[in-house]
Image (cartoon, rainbow, N blue to C red):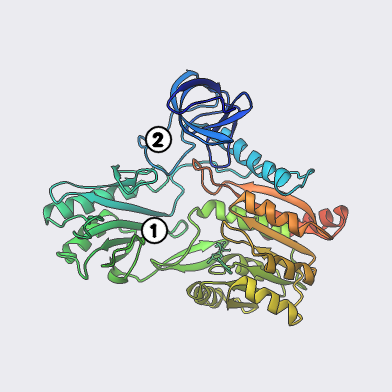
Amino acid sequence: MIPVEKNKTYSVTIEAISSEGSGIAHIDGYTIFVPQTAVGDVCRVLVVKVKSNYAYAKLKELLTPSPVRTEPVCPAFSKCGGCVFQHLTYEEQLRIKKQTIEDALIRIGNLQNAHVEEILGMEHPLRYRNKMVFPIGGSVENPVCGFYRERSHDIIPLSDCALGDAMNQDIIKTVLSFMKEFRIAPYQEETHSGCVRRIFTRRAYHTGEWMVVLSVNANALPHAEEFVKRICAISGDIVSIYLNCNQQKNNLVLGGKNVLLFGKPVISDLLCALSYEISPDSFFQVNPQQTEKLYQKAIEFAGITKDDTVLDVYCGIGTISLSAAQKAKNVIGVEIVPQAIENAKENAKRNQISNATFYAAAAEDLVPKLIADGIRPDVVILDPPRKGCDENTLNAILTAQPKRIVYVSCNPATLARDLKLLTKKDYSLKKAVGVDMFPWTHHVESVVCLSREKADDYIRISVHTKDLQTKSN
Ligand code: SAH
């Protein structure tokens, strides 16, 4: 018997938070998910969808608010699909994320004794994003900029996002007033008409350089010179301005071709003291401060020495590979996107790193081949997309018997699934930690280390590498 009915209200107490960020309550053992609630909330909820094992409900009235609630910093909370945890204190967000990792390791990974270290949070968890995308809509008379409503393409007008740099506000204002003055129409998705689709900005954390890209449904921008003049007047830090010409009926952030309107084709940034050049299309981690913490943890867990060969699978533009290369004998990076591998090779050159080799291939094809050809990495680093690793990749790695496997993951569920396979025989989980790369959202990154070594040996090695890191800092 399902104890609730659609369109009826019920009083519930929120007991936990799901991995998607919804509150969880129970009525007679039956689960109800309620978004935008906190553990300890007593509330009246309206059931909106009923399934055999669970239901979804909307918060209607907060009868007793939980002490872990806080005032959302953003006026668009509850409308914009971005931050689901704006109503929670930062400490509570970190607690939930650590719990999510622990639960996944225990329930999915069957790793009963998993000890997860204290999660690495941010000291100042706002305005951390180095990349922002603002869709443009409205009319010629009244162009608006904002965010997509959750699960839709309606634009909620907003002049700021608390996760991005405050200077984005000036850029938005300038673009909208330019459009209004010169009567340049916003793009209309339904009719594939109009011009300006979105504003895209990038800020290099260490060098302070900015890139501004205006995406248009056209092959040129009317009054482009005036546009450049106005954007440059915002700040001398804006060193690169592009027009992204995308006349296709798609929803890519930057489709079509990029035309440089002003300044440098790339901006430069540092990550773990290595230098990177970022173009409009380059993949670059969006939270630079936390990325450094993540990579430092991965390198620390890996315990790399000068005799080690490191295999970095899913290497992107080679950022982890190049950090590892400084400590290893050599590094092999594998990544499916050829452009990212081109960037990785350029990045190695720019940083005068000559002991890293990069291959553009699917990990599930190339890793088994490399192992069959006799390559025996001492350390394997995995950093797959949300869906996790392919079984062929994991089985090949097990055949190669590296000393250590460091797994960096943006999805605790697939991480735990893959760890179940990897810990079937010789390997055991030695370390696990969460890194909060995306404060106010439900996303959490984790780093774990598996090893064949006995616990004492492993601890000795990791203490040794930690010492080395402290000395070199
Ligand atoms: N380690 C990098 C990138 C991690 S994101 C960093 O820290 O920046 C995951 C990467 O896996 C992406 O670059 C994606 O293009 C790549 N990828 C996705 N599927 C893949 C596959 N089957 N084989 C190899 N790489 C893949």
Residue type, numbered disc 2: Ser
Tag 1: Cα neighbours inside 10 Å, few (<14), some, or many (≥20)?
many
Q: Quadrant of residue 227?
A: bottom left
Helix, strand or loop at label 2? It is loop
User: In the picture provided, is 293 more to the left or to the right than 190?
Assistant: right
Would you place residue 374 above or below residue 91 in this image?
A: below
Instruction: From this view, report whether residue 108 is shown above or below residue 296.
Output: above
Q: Which residue is pictured at 39% across the width and 69% down the height?
A: 266
Q: Which residue is the extreme one toward the front?
A: 1
Can residue 471 be seen here? The reply is no
Q: Is residue 397 left or right of residue 26?
A: right
Would you name the residue on which mark 1 appears?
202
Residue 376 in the figure: left or right of residue 295? right
Q: Amino acid at mark 1?
A: Arg
Where is residue 272? Give x, y as percent. 58, 61
Q: Quadrant of the C terminus?
A: bottom right
Specify whether residue 387 is in view: yes
Image label count: 2
Could you classify mark 2 by the number of other residues whose Cα lies within 10 Å: few (under 14), some (14-19), or many (20 or more)?
Answer: some
Q: Quadrant of the N terminus?
A: top right
Seen in the picture, residue 163 relative to 66 is either above or below; the reply is below
Q: Residue at x 71, y 43 (%)?
A: 107
Q: Which residue is mark 2?
A: 78
The residue at the point 82 percent across, 56 percent down is 458
Q: Which mark is residue 439?
A: none
Ligand 1 picture quarter: bottom right
